[in-house]
Amino acid sequence: MEIEECFVEVMGLQIHVARKPDSSERPLLLFNGIGANLEILIPLMQALKGIECITFDMPGIGLSEVPALPMRFKGLAKMSAQILDHFGYGQADALGVSWGGAMAQEFAHRFPKRCQNLILAATSAGAIMVPGKPSVFMKLTNPKRYFDKNYLKDIAQHIYGGELRKDPELMNEYTDRVRPPKSSQGYLYQLYAGAYWTSIHWLHKLPQQTLILAGTDDPLVPVVNARILHSRIPNSQLIEIDCGHLLLMTKMAEVAPMITDFLTYSDPAVQLSVVH
């Protein structure tokens, strides 16, 4: 299925949306990492055979309009629900990677009747997370990696780990899809949205069947954070994958079928295998 792109006015802002129509009962709403434009997720959307997908650039990111004031996760979750409303989606599954994993948790928490299944990749419970190395975190907070593709390639193996340590050329396809934010303001607004946020005190209340994916060599979000999520979310299963932070890209051939199977046959009794 071809990807359809458009702009939707939500909460007074023009938001860039991408959608892949397909045959699934409900769409998969994808939340991207901090500063990341929706084009980065398009290969994954295309790889999810039979799954309708929808994603959007956060305010001030990619082609979406920069808001006058920043929003917290609560407001961004409300925006997500209104985007679903625009396309007539009553229910959705949600997938979030890294910063977007926190957004997916917030959406599932705020709209439990609208979020059927939850997929969390390379993410944590927020402010109480077990952090990576300080040097890695400092590189993450600097939006320079989205404005300077050569800089992004230079630091990729250090901040993302996994296969990129041995083959930095894997970043070429990724960086080709990177679109700088309209300004550093949008990136800073995303940092603000997640500041001091944590889901740890309500994770045990999440009713969704949840698939947690984590790389065992993730410098940004150490795998112990996925284990914490798994211990707190009642109906969850954890898959630890021998890779780094960008597991949805570097292990897409293996991970996409896992996601498809989970959404198609979601059942707490189903056990998925670890990928090495």
Image (cartoon, rainbow, N blue to C red):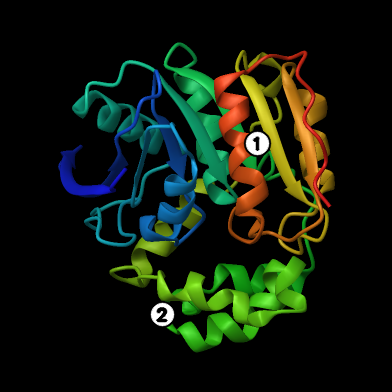
Q: Amino acid at mark 1?
A: Met
Residue 206, position in %: x, y? 63, 17
Residue 231, position in %: x, y? 83, 27
Contact, mark 1 vs mark 2 (Cβ under 8 Å): no
Q: Secondary structure at mark 1?
A: helix
Q: For this rendering, which residue is in front, 260 or 7?
A: 260
Compute the Cα span from label 1 to label 2: 33 Å
Compared to 78, does 241 lie above or below?
Answer: below
Q: Is residue 199 left or right of residue 110?
A: right
Eye-nearest disc, 1 or 2? 1
In the rendered image, which residue does mark 1 sit on? 258
Compared to 236, does 205 lie above or below?
Answer: above
**Numbered circle sitting on residue 247:** none
Residue at 78% across / 33% down in the picture?
238
Q: Is residue 197 left or right of residue 68?
A: right
Locate the N terminus by quadrant.
top left
Residue 190, position in %: x, y? 45, 54
| Mark 1 Cα-neighbour bin, 10 Å: few <14, some 14–19, many ≥20 | some
Specify whether residue 13 is in view: no
Q: Quadrant of residue 225?
A: top right
Compared to 150, does 63 lie above or below?
Answer: above
Label whose residue precedes the other's in the sequence (1 or 2): 2
Compared to 128, does 186 lie above or below?
Answer: below
Q: Amino acid at mark 2?
A: Phe
Callout count: 2
Specify whether residue 135 is in view: yes
Q: For this rendering, which residue is in front, 167 or 140?
A: 167
In the rendered image, which residue does mark 2 sit on? 147
Q: Is residue 180 left or right of residue 63?
A: right
